[in-house]
Image (cartoon, coloured by chain):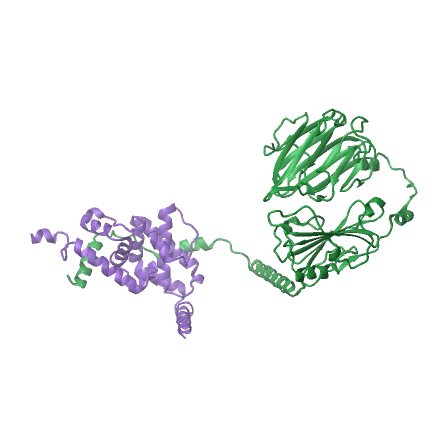
Chain colours: A purple, B green
Amino acid sequence: VSARCNDFARLERRTLVRLGKRPVSAEIERVYATRYASFCRLASTVTGNVEAAHDAVQEGFARALARRDEFRGDGSLEGWLWRIVLRVALDGRKHGRLRPLVLYEDSESMAAQWVPVLPHPELDPELADALRALPERQRLVVFLRYFADLSHAEIAAITGMRSGTVSATLAHAKTALARRLDGRLLPGEREAAS
Amino acid sequence: VNDDHLDDILRERFGRQADPLPASDFADVRRRERSQTARPRRPFHLRWGLAVAVALLVGSGLGFALGTSSTSSGNAASAPVGLGFLPERGWAVLQSGTSATPERPAVSIAANVPLHPDDDADSLPYSTLLSLPPKGVVILASFTTRGDEWHDRSFPAHGLPLRLRDAAPAGAQVRPEKPLGQYQLRAGVNGHNVDVNVYFGTPRPATPLVRAAQRQLDRLVVRPARTRDRVEERALPMRPTATPQLGLGMQATSRMINRTLRCTPGVVYGSVRELDVTAKPRGALGSGGRSDDISPGYISVGSGLASGPFDDLVFARSRFEERGVAPGNPFPPGVYADVRRCAPARVSVPLSAKGLPGPPVRFDQDADCEVRGRVLVRLRAVLEAPTAWRRADAPYFGARRNVVEAKIAVRSERTRRPIALLALDRGGETRLWVSSGCS
């Protein structure tokens, strides 16, 4: 019964996206317009600079648009777009060129290739040090949550983790960061306080 | 620090890292998308054609699988010649598809196990025998026409069905490391000499296995042979054609012996087999070093572990000389092959020394080569006069005539790598090339 329910749920999502009032291309455009900044920041943690990230996001959305018929509807459209943009950004960084896109590539295998770094560590060396001390998985989740401003569900879709695992990982990361960042103080506040 | 406050702190500090983003325009995305989709797609009719082709392929495969599963496991050859086995239930049958002659046997193989793909219908199914399980049985029957009184003595006249109880244990073990039960039965049936070799997967086959073999032997078919004389009576002599043929076509062809054989050398250990390659130019002393055994010019490829009286698989002797060949020697000048251990092969073996280290050895030389599996031997000889390839002293067939020149090339059947090349010329001079693996 559970499997049947899942099938119906999947079919419903798919129907909503593909056969509903808004075609898939319009949905893609909407996501681009509303979440461009998040996509671009996410990509910049991979590419290392905003211009390359912008290019990766545009290329990723163009690919998604060209292959929108292949969207299976068994997950959210946004999660699908995240994976495509991430794949394009990773390929652009690694090879300097784009390889044939595997739309349903394992998310964990993509995330494993990705160690995000702060674009400007010199602005906040304390945060940079604290992030470097985190395990890779925690660091990735922290970046996705606070730098790309993604929800737990979106992080789960990108990384292949369960939503609960994302929450737990994020909680551990925050505890470690709080200890290293000396509690509640923002940079400069400590000096002012002293 | 409560969780919300920590969230705010982190969001603030990460926010300072964010660069101003470039202007985003979805029109750029659409332009990129159009450039990607501009790639030519397969035309509609081609896609349908591809789908139909795939469907046909899948359908034929399914049909083949169904047909295979519903067909009896016994299979007969495509060229029935009235000699061979009809398959008993659960047995596979393979026939050489050739007619029996005094010179060349027709062969039929029956087995209650799948025959190995490396095995042919016209020789010992060696690969199948090497992997024969304890409950496996292979029956090999070869047929030659009767007519040679001396030879026919070994094949007492008998009617069908032949009986396994009359079979005698056979000599040389095909699989020494894990012996087979080997039996031989010879009988003269319907004008044919029938040589039946039965191989059991175990030296002491159980009664049900022997019964199963007998049931398959009961299905042996031997069509009555038409005598050679009658054929010749109907065919010969022919009148000459109205237009005389020019040149030496027929004569040249009959002077030339050109055969490629697949030969089975004797086992040394495991899968390693021994091959002897010998070249004795005219004047060299024989193997015993006796002064009255002087070579007339001789090249051979042999294997010393044969069960027969002679080791050679294929050999060529140069022109006859009184002092070189003792009276009564069964092998006057000519070219010969052991038909028990060699069978015709339809493969190309170049008569070339390419791949073999040179220069060739021109003196008396004997090299031992270790090989794995069978070997391909090509024999090409030019004789002084036309002659037929016919039975010589058993187990040899050959062409008896002075040899003008002869070459023998040997290659591994498995790897096709050259092993040796031997040459014999009109004057009895020899040349020998051997691979570096020979000593």
- In the rendered image, the residue lying farthest to the left is A194
Q: Foreground residue, B347 or B413? A: B413
Residue at 69% x, 28% y is B431
Q: Residue furthest bottom?
A: A1
Quarter of the image for residue B236 reads top right
Q: Is residue B43 left or right of residue A130?
A: right
Residue closest to the eye, B308 or B373: B308
B135 lies left or right of B105: left
In the visual, does B363 lie left or right of B393?
left
Front residue of this view, candidates B167 and A189 = B167
Where on the picture, by quarter, is residue A145?
bottom left
Relative to B408, residue A119 above or below: below
- Residue B91 appears in the picture as rendered: yes
- The location of residue B344, given as percent across then percent down, is 72, 44
**In the figure, B348 relative to B200: above or below?**
above
- Counting from the top left corner in percent of width and height, residue A181 is at 16, 54
Give x and y (percent) for residue A35: 30, 60
Q: How many marks?
A: 0
Of the 4 image quadrants, the one containing the N terminus of chain B is: bottom left
Residue A71: horizontal and vertical position, in percent? Answer: 42, 63
Tell me, yes or no, if residue B12 can be seen here: no
- In this rendering, the answer to whether B296 lies above or below B416 is above
Horizontal placement of A131 versus B323: left or right?
A: left
Quarter of the image with the C terminus of chain B in it: top right
* Quarter of the figure with residue B322: top right
